[in-house]
Image (cartoon, helix red, strand yellow):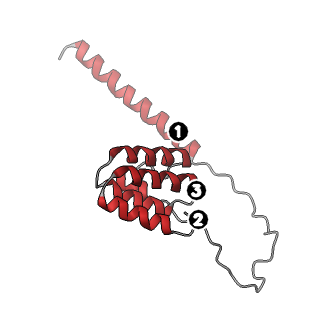
Amino acid sequence: MSIEFVIAIIVIVVGVIIVGFVTSRRRTEDELVSLSPLEPAPWPIDDGSEARLVPRDPEIGWPSRLGSASGPMDDEVRLRLIKDLGLIHAAWVVPILTQAYKEEREPSHRDAVRQALAACEQPDARAALEVASRSPDA
């Protein structure tokens, strides 16, 4: 073995030892936790009252039918998506728009769904549009 080869091996071993030491030190410093005593709750825990359900907005699930794995979309993005679906004019868009109409609560979104269904010119779209126009909040 040549001297350059031995020196290279020694440098690599020393480098691995240094990296291992530094990462182990960093990990132990990150794992330090300071504990503080818990403060008492500002209200009595068992007050004898009944629990009540608080209604929440229904979840908007229709964008997930398009393969959106990025999580919930905000109102502006959903509105733009509804308008874009209205430009497609394909039969596969109708069930998605129908679900969007059922789930959306914003009047502007529901109007956009009705306009998109009207633009589709599909038999299913016409039927869905008639159902939407008969809904009480149309």
Where residue 114 appears, as percent x and y from the top left, is 46, 55
Q: Quadrant of the C terminus?
A: bottom right
Where residue 65 appears, as percent x and y from the top left, is 36, 56
Asked whether, in this view, residue 54 is left or right of residue 31, the answer is right
Tell me the CA gap for discs 3 and 2.
11 Å
Q: Quadrant of the N terminus?
A: top left
Asked whether, in this view, residue 35 is left or right of residue 75, the answer is right
> Label 3 crowding class (10 Å Cα cut-off): few <14, some 14-19, many 20+?
few
Query: Residue at the left extreme?
Result: 1
Tell me the CA gap for discs 2 and 1.
47 Å
Q: Earlier in the sequence, mark 1 or mark 3?
A: 1
Q: Nearer the viewer, residue 38 or 105?
A: 105
Marks 2 and 1: which is nearer the front? 2
Secondary element at image label 2:
loop
Q: Which amino acid does label 3 sit on?
A: Glu
Q: Nearer the viewer, residue 24 or 118?
A: 118
Q: Residue at x 75, y 77 (%)?
A: 45
User: In the rendering, which numbered label is found on residue 106?
Assistant: 3
User: In the rendering, which numbered label is found on residue 57?
Assistant: 2
Q: Is residue 113 above or below residue 26?
A: below
Q: Is residue 135 above or below residue 3?
A: below
Residue 95, visible in the rendered structure: no
Q: Nearer the viewer, residue 111 or 22?
A: 111
Secondary element at image label 3:
loop
> What residue is shown with label 1?
25
Marks 3 and 2: which is nearer the front? 3
User: In the rendering, which numbered label is found on residue 40?
Assistant: none
Q: Which residue is drawn at 48% across and 64% down?
A: 133
Q: Earlier in the sequence, mark 3 or mark 2?
A: 2
